[in-house]
Image (tube, grey):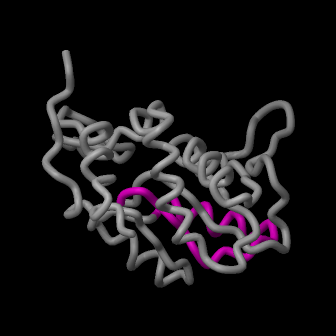
């Protein structure tokens, strides 16, 4: 069952797609965006998204790894839906305490599936795949809630990571205005 046929796309759009100015890390300014925190804050929607995404977890996956910060609530919900252990990925190693970049489940020697909220260029997921490969994980797949058509799928494919997305940008109805 697809996210669009169940009305899940409309629920995601109504909750998490907003029209408002949003500045990306590279300085690009968007006039609408996907607010993953709104999705994560709605327990029923997060549960339903995880259930829908669970059908796309590849056979043989051993660990689900969520990219900070948007991928973390998704990977926790997806872990609960699938029974697979979760790992949590920082963009850089923690500067204190454990000083780890990977927390949670062990990834070395295991088939790890990356999980994130939105994929645009794919550069963040590629960086995480490379880091996981350096520590001994086998990374060939990534999952996201929303794929924006900005080259991410192609970049990841070029580096041996197949992208599965619950929704593409074209699946979503128009964003709603941000409440004042």
Q: Specify whether residue 130 is painted magenta.
A: yes
Does residue 27 appear left or right of residue 174 in this picture?
right
Q: Quadrant of the C terminus?
A: top left
Q: Nearer the viewer, residue 163 or 160?
A: 163
Please indicate, yes or no, whether residue 116 appears anywhere in the rendered image: yes
For the record, the magenta segment spans: 123-146
Please report the residue visible at 40 percent of the width from the left and 54 percent of the height from the top. Answer: 118
Residue 143 position in % (x across, y down)? 51, 65
173 vs 178: above or below: below
Residue drawn at point x = 62 percent, y = 52 percent: 66
Q: In the picture, residue 84 is in which quadrant? A: bottom right
Nearest the camera: 27 or 30? 30
Q: Quadrant of residue 4?
A: bottom left
Residue 3 position in % (x across, y down)? 35, 61
Image position, residue 69 (x, y; %): 55, 40
User: Residue farthest to the top?
Assistant: 180
Number of disc labels: 0
> Where residue 146 appears, x then y in whole percent?
36, 58
Residue 126 visible in the picture: no
| In the displayed structure image, the side of residue 118 where residue 86 appears, left or right | right
Residue 5 part of the magenta-drawn span: no
Identity of the residue drawn at 35% across and 38% down: 35
Return the residue nearer the eye: 179 or 22: 179
Is 176 placed left or right of 153 in the picture? Answer: left
């Amino acid at each position: 069952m697809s996210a669009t046929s169940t009305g899940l796309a409309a629920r995601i759009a109504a909750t998490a797609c907003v029209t408002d100015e949003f500045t990306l890390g590279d300085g690009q300014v968007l006039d609408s965006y996907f607010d993953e925190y709104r999705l994560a804050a709605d327990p029923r929607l997060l549960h339903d998204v995880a259930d829908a995404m669970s059908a796309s977890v590849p056979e043989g996956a051993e660990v689900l790894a969520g990219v900070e910060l948007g991928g973390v609530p998704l990977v926790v919900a997806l872990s609960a839906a699938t029974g697979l252990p979760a790992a949590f990925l920082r963009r850089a190693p923690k500067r204190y305490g454990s000083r780890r970049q990977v927390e949670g489940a062990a990834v070395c020697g295991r088939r790890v599936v990356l999980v994130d909220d939105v994929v645009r260029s794919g550069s963040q997921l590629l960086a995480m795949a490379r880091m996981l490969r350096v520590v001994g994980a086998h990374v060939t797949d990534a999952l996201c809630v929303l794929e924006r058509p900005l080259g991410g799928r192609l970049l990841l494919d070029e580096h041996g990571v197949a992208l599965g997305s619950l929704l593409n940008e074209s699946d979503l109805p128009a964003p709603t205005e941000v409440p004042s």
